[in-house]
Amino acid sequence: MRKIINRQRRRSFGLIALFFVGWEVACLVSGMSDLILPRPSQVFTTMFQRMPILWPHILQTLMTTMIGFALGVALGVVLGAVIGVSRTAYETAYPLLIGFSSIPKVAVVPIFVLWFGSGTVPAVLTALSICFFPIVVNIATGLATTEPELEDVLKALGASKLDILWNVGLPRTMPFFFASLKVAVTYAFVGTVLSETVASNRGIGNVMMTASSNFNVPMVFAGLFILAGMGIALYVVFSLIESRVTGWANRKNDFAAA
Amino acid sequence: MQFGMTIIAAMAPPAVLPAKDLTDPHAGRPVPAVELSRVSVTFGQASDSVAALAETNLRIHEGEFLALVGPSGCGKSTILRLVGGLIQPTEGVVILGGREVAARALRIGMAFQNPTMLPWLTIEQNIMLPLKIVEPFRSQFRKEKRGAFRDKAHDLLAQVGLKGFAGKFPWQLSGGMLQRANLCRALIHEPRMLMLDEPFGALDQFTREELWAIMQKMWLAHKPTVLLVTHDLREAAFLGTRICVMSARPGRIVDDAPVPFARPRTIAMTFEPDFVALNQRLRSLIVEARSGATVSEESL
């Protein structure tokens, strides 16, 4: 079993490497100008050469994203719990939420800037506003799918709504919650960078904006690669937490041995 | 036992009767554990409403094991949910322990056909769930979950033949085993009242019979008041001290008779002539109730 997994993993790594090699070769063969599409090797070279300059921006973007994400999770959990438990809240808040999530966040950034000035605060708010929605939906769904029979058993025992929420609703929601965290954290990056591009003088979004106005296309791509890398890294972190915390949802296989 | 015989279906025309005004023909006798007076339940609104229960009177006495049988959809489960305080009657009153109290205050133990074990907890933790909710256990839970409560859970598991399964997760157990655990969960807080809604319905014949015997043993040991809703007439006659038969929807109680057989009953007894005769009588009553339903549906 292990062997098969390892072989599969090696194969997928190989294919990913092949993608970059293919890109490199295609650019070389076609003589593509690096003003249009730089080769991966150029991008990585730029990334490492300019790392001292990029580093503070990476930290800025990472920090902004994590703050926005943390706030988004807090807001998402509370809203999701309320919506999942109360019918009235569900019917009131759902249309509002769907309306809000349909608004392109580009349109919201100027408003945040108007309120809080440019810089970190609007970036945090944009990250928050873009990432809390999947969390709300998943928490609410998880709570709403509690088995009615079990709820009856607990109600007959005199359990309060809070008891049921705490003992049944929230644990049941955990798999949904972690699945949504993985999605939400990548959304949060989108929000941060979006706001940094429009209104900030720090962060990867700003670096990319400046680089593109200087026609420094390899630098733009370096920014993209960094964002993608951070997104993947956080996705992996949350996947690992997920498999540790909610292993019961994946049944048998690995969990039985644990 | 004689109280049982006095319960008849309420055939009187509907009348607005204040709950407190009920004349009690049993004045001076022990207060029934459960009393439904002229209770009717209607689901839904106006035009598409469904009458689940029509003017039903029912008494269940302390320590009694009442089996409720009837054609499907006749409102058996509705009665169980009424007693459990999970729904409110549209008309009439439900009186528990002599007072019109909220059923929740009685901490009724319940078990359904679906064992609904929580997949992230071990069997032992699942069984201890009521202790997390019901006082006085609740306030001791943190301290006792590894001590007395755990012993209690293990003891119950041993009684239903699940010794050694305490640390397993629900998906590692078969349907029959889960249903045993479900019974343990319903009993762990030593409820005075137990509501069972077809708890053995999804099991094979042999497992079912084995669980009847376990159920009987548990009942004889603690003598809780039990209301068992079932489709299985043998089950009703094996376990019940009394059997009520309900008519088709809207349900009302059309027959109410004690079960005379001595305890502890054995599976062998269920094949004796008296037992078979009782089963046949119940069967014909239900067949009659069902045919009534067909006629009324056609006339709609």
Image (cartoon, grey):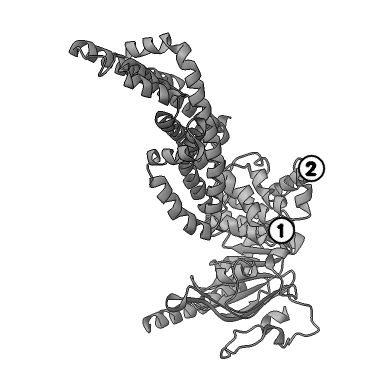
**In the orientation shown, which residue stands out farthest toward the right?**
B28
Q: Residue at x 54, y 48 (%)?
A: A79
Residue under pointer 1: B218
Query: Which one is nearer the viewer's eye here, A235 or A52?
Result: A52
User: Where does residue B209 sit, x and y in percent of width and height?
Assistant: 59, 58
User: Where does residue B183 sit, x and y in percent of width and height?
Assistant: 65, 55
User: Where does residue B262 sit, x and y in percent of width and height?
Assistant: 71, 69
User: Where does residue B25 sit, x and y in percent of width and height?
Assistant: 73, 87
Query: Which one is nearer the viewer's eye here, A127 or A113?
Result: A113
**Image quarter for residue B63?**
bottom right
Q: Does label 1 lie on the same chain as label 2? A: yes
Q: Secondary structure at mark 1?
A: helix
Q: Is residue B242 above or below residue B109?
A: below
Question: Mark 2 or mark 1: which comes first in sequence?
Answer: 2
Q: Amino acid at mark 2?
A: Lys
Q: Residues within 10 Å of mark 2 (few under 14, many from 20)?
A: few
Image quadrant containing the N terminus of chain A: top left
| Subunit of label 1 | B
Asked if residue B149 lies left or right of residue B181, the reply is right
Query: Which one is nearer the viewer's eye here, B51 or A85?
Result: A85
Q: Secondary structure at mark 2?
A: helix
The circle on residue B143 is 2
Q: Residue at x 69, y 64 (%)?
A: B104
Q: Is residue B109 above or below residue A59?
A: below
Asked if residue A172 lies left or right of residue A114, the reply is right
Disc 2 from disc 1: Cα separation: 27 Å
Q: Is residue A11 visible?
A: no
Q: Residues within 10 Å of mark 1 (few under 14, many from 20)?
A: some
| Subunit of label 2 | B
Q: Is residue B223 above or below residue A226?
A: below
Q: Amino acid at mark 1?
A: Met
Q: Is residue A220 visible?
A: yes
